[in-house]
Amino acid sequence: MPTCLAGRTAPEADVRAHGTSLAKLIPTPGRLDPARAEQRLARLLMADAELRAALFRFVDVHPACTNGHHLVRHLHELLNEAQGSPTARRGAKLVGQPMLRRPVAVTARAGVRHVAKRFILGADAASAEPGIRSLWDAGVATTVDLLGEATVTEAEADVYVGRCDTALRELSRRAAGWPARPDLEHDRAGTLPRVNLSVKVSAMTTEMRAAAPDRGGDGAENHLRGLMRVAREVGAHLHVDMEAVDTRETITALTLRLLAEPEFRDGPSCGVVVQAYLVESAAHLDELLEWADGHPRSSPLTIRLVKGAYWDHEVVQAAQHGWAPPVFLDRRATDHNFEALTRTLLDNVPMVRAAIASHNLRSVAHAMAYADTVGLDRGDVEFQILRGLGDDLQTAIAASGRRVRCYSPAGDLVAGMAYLVRRLLENTANDSFLAAAVGASDLTTLLEAP
């Protein structure tokens, strides 16, 4: 049966000790390090909401600009609309000068592509593999996310699934030549695959609709079953991402139904996601733990705990329909829930594998401290960081001797633009951990209990 050590918490002194140790391992950018310029830009964007909106809209429209003239015109218009931002107004005047159009176009295009490369590892699995191998050599595992969601034609769905099939086979072939990394390849439950692919069910079907959840699940079933077979064949891990709340039940039911089929009892390694910003996330985790208890597998179900990336979408959609928001509206409530879910999840290792996905120093330190409290080994808990958002924390976790995995998107700029804008919004949110870090908040504040 699933266990929960009621009332057990991690001592605050231990949380602070882990957080302090991690903070000391976070690298400090050198004088000429591009990270310094990125931090200055982040400070500017966090302090100027209109400038932030204008630039993110420009990033979003960038792929549709067919030439430099269109690029500069859109940038000028978007900056000019941000009348409440003195910085944007000055930028609009500068961009509007005819003699500067060519250098502005070149600089703007290069800037967007620089930002994209920070978040997106490569155009496809083959071009991403050198970066994946580099991370592996540095003691960091990866999960590759082939960008794409909400397909509108069956041909698009077939292409997406084909890309996933190719990625599983190509990365597995190349990974066979990687050096041994025992800390990344084994835990108490057994072998951890070198290749890990995250997939989105909504990209496998055109029928994913909240009004007809069974139809969406049926449309994706054969595609997901086929990818599970490929993952089992090549010895890879397949992780099913969660998306908007109106598809959560469909995606969960489909994934668990397939994993319960006899042919998948002995593989592949597979996982699902719990989003802590959802009010119902505790019940979702209980549902997954009950399933895992009743369906023992040779490779335990992996549960990735995240805060969630669709907060704005959920709040706006709920308001449009007159619904109560399905998410916590207060950041601290989400952080508090994340810690409660962390404890429940770690209480059930090794019946399930636990992946704690967060860039929040407090959340990571709490998970480490609680794992120690309940007697788990360092290899029993995996920490996951999103490429481009938590690179420094990733380095610190790896240096601490814990297993860390980088969530690494791959895809072309057009396919990745919605993802990129969402990540940029997260990166510059005024209440985010990264905003606090860039603002040089003291360590006591960063490690304060929610």
Image: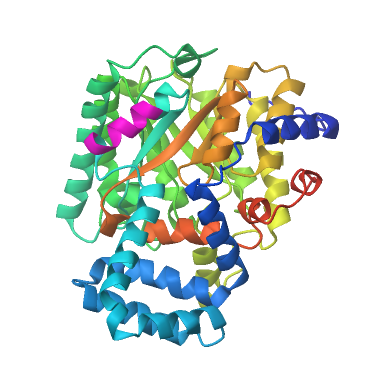
Q: Residue furthest left?
A: 155
The x, y position of residue 393, in whole percent, is 58, 37
Q: Between residue 281 and residue 21, name the one nearer to us.
A: 21
Residue in front for this viewpoint, 429 or 265: 429
> Could you tell whether 280 is left or right of 6 in the image?
left
Residue 328 sits above or below residue 250 on the image: below
The residue positioned 37% from the left and 71% from the top of the image is 58
Q: Quadrant of residue 86?
A: bottom right
Q: Nearer the viewer, residue 334 or 282?
A: 334
Give the percent coordinates (x, y) of residue 160: 22, 46
What's the coloring here? rainbow
Vertical side of 287 occupied by 95: above or below: below
Residue 166 x, y percent position in the rendering:
19, 34
Q: How many marks?
A: 0
Q: Which residues are magenta?
A: 126-134
| Magenta span includes 129 | yes
Q: Position of residue 436 (x, y in %)?
A: 68, 54
Q: Visible in this render: residue 174?
A: yes
Which residue sits at x=25%, y=45%?
Answer: 123
Q: Main secondary structure of the magenta part?
A: helix
Which image quarter holds the N terminus? top right
User: Does residue 403 appear to the left or right of 348 in the view shown?
Assistant: left
In the image, residue 449 lies in the stretch drawn in magenta: no
